[in-house]
Amino acid sequence: MDDIAQQISEQIPHLRRYARALARDRTRADDLVQDCLERAWSRLHLWQPGSNLKAWLFTILHNLHANQVRKLKRALDNVPLSESHLSASTPATQMQQLEVKGITDALQRLSEEQRAVVLLVGLEEMSYQEAAKVLDVPIGTVMSRLHRGRERVRQLLADQGQPVLRRVK
């Protein structure tokens, strides 16, 4: 049991980063991670040893977020975003801050589906297969959403006059 606790605790920083990108608010993101960990512990008997624990945890987190979004959409017609939701999580120089803000703005303008795939594959460095499992969609859907999402981010950055990001090989 100590081994599984250690493995889960190693995923907390990754879960927090993904939750912050999804929730766009530190407090809501921390609550989301807390709910995810609570659900994971209470349903640990459902996890199959030997399977991908990270993907299982991210699936729980993603599904909790999707449920929260559905509830919010039913409760509110429009939730305004304040500028504080778009700030970088670490201090940056002015130029870096502008670049981060541009990328953050571009990510926020993606659809929920595209943003989730871009964050899982690009930020969390998940494989297409892992992202497909987390999102419960076929790998081809992950690939097309990722391609469209990346292209949309490039287009939005170019429209803002920011340098267009190119893939590093």
Image (tube, rainbow, N blue to C red):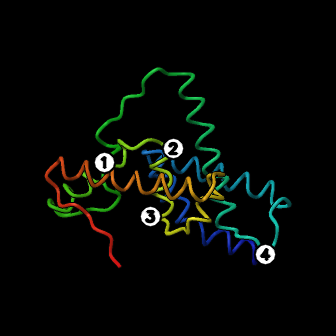
**Spot occupied by residue 150 in the image (x, y as percentages of width and height):** 37, 56
Label 4 sits on what residue type? Answer: Gly
Q: Which amino acid, by three-letter code, is at mark 3?
A: Leu
The image's mark for residue 106 is 1
Q: Residues within 10 Å of mark 4 (few under 14, many from 20)?
A: few
The numbered mark, 4 or 3, whose residue comes first in the sequence reads 4
x 60%, y 72%: residue: 10
Q: Quadrant of residue 43?
A: bottom right
* Residue 123 x/y as whole percent: 44, 64
Look at discs 1 and 2 and give the one toward the viewer. 1
Is 96 placed above or below 25 here?
below
**Which of the image's four quarters has the N terminus?**
bottom right
Q: Report the Cα–Cα distance between label 1 and label 4.
A: 37 Å
Find the distance from the CA under tag 1 to the CA under tag 2. Answer: 21 Å
Query: Which disc number belongs to residue 123?
Result: 3
Q: Are marks 2 and 3 in contact (CB under 8 Å)?
A: no
Q: Earlier in the sequence, mark 1 or mark 3?
A: 1
Residue at 64%, 46% (x, y): give it: 63
> In the rendered view, does 42 fall on the left or right side of 111?
right
Sequence-wise, which precedes: disc 1 or disc 4? 4
Name the kind of residue labelled 2 in the image: Arg
Pointer 4 or 2: first along the chain: 2
- Which amino acid, by three-letter code, is at mark 1? Ala
Residue that carries the numbered disc 2 in the rendered image: 28
